[in-house]
Image (cartoon, grey):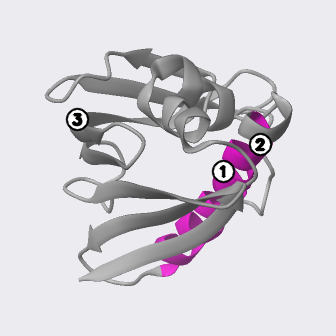
Amino acid sequence: MVDILHRVGIKAPVSKVYAALSTVEGIAGWWTRDANGATQPGSHIDLRFHAPGGELMGGMNMEVLALEPDRHVHWRFVEGPDEWVGTDATFDLAQDGEFTIVRFGHRHWREAVEFTEHCSTKWATFLLSLRDLVETGRGRPAPNDVWIGNWH
């Protein structure tokens, strides 16, 4: 198994970071504008990713496995790219002075492939979008996210 791991500090109270991770509105502010569903444990969130011109590039569905206010968010991908199905995304939060530290994992990839490398870079850009959303009120969700190559 392979995991993608990242750490980012966000200059904001942990409650603001948790809100951006644990609500559909929050997710739409940093990851993709096309986010729908419910965020209670056991519920599902549908995500669609569009190019700036509007064409659909892909999507996924994830189950919310756990929410621990101001501490932890856990999702499992149940539909989407083959490499993602059955993988988990986790966000562990901790306040450290004026920063909230986000320790992110996209866990349980079956193997490391080129798509894993691409997704690791994309996760980094989206975590910086999360930081920008919480710190400034303006993230860079798809379709206005950072392009990193021919796969977007």
Q: Which of marks 2 and 3 is nearer the N terminus?
A: 3
User: Could you tell me which secondary element the residue under label 3 belongs to?
Assistant: strand
Most common secondary structure along the magenta stretch: helix
Height in image: 2 above or below 101? below
Question: Is residue 132 in the magenta section?
Answer: yes
Question: Is residue 2 in the magenta section?
Answer: no
Q: Which of marks 1 and 2 is in front?
A: 1
User: Could you tell me which secondary element the residue under label 2 belongs to?
Assistant: loop
Q: Nearer the viewer, residue 38 or 148?
A: 38
CA–CA distance in space, label 1 to label 2: 8 Å
Q: Name the residue under label 2.
A: 145
Query: Which mark is on residue 126?
Result: 1
As drawn, is 53 to the left or to the right of 47?
right
Amino acid type, label 1: Phe
- Numbered circles on residues, count: 3
Amino acid type, label 3: Glu
Q: Which stretch appears magenta? A: 114-133
Residue 135 appearing in the image: yes
Q: Earlier in the sequence, mark 3 or mark 1?
A: 3
**Residue displayed at 45% across by 74% down:** 4
Query: Which mark is on residue 63?
Result: 3
Residue 107 occupies quadrant = bottom left
Height in image: 68 above or below 122? above
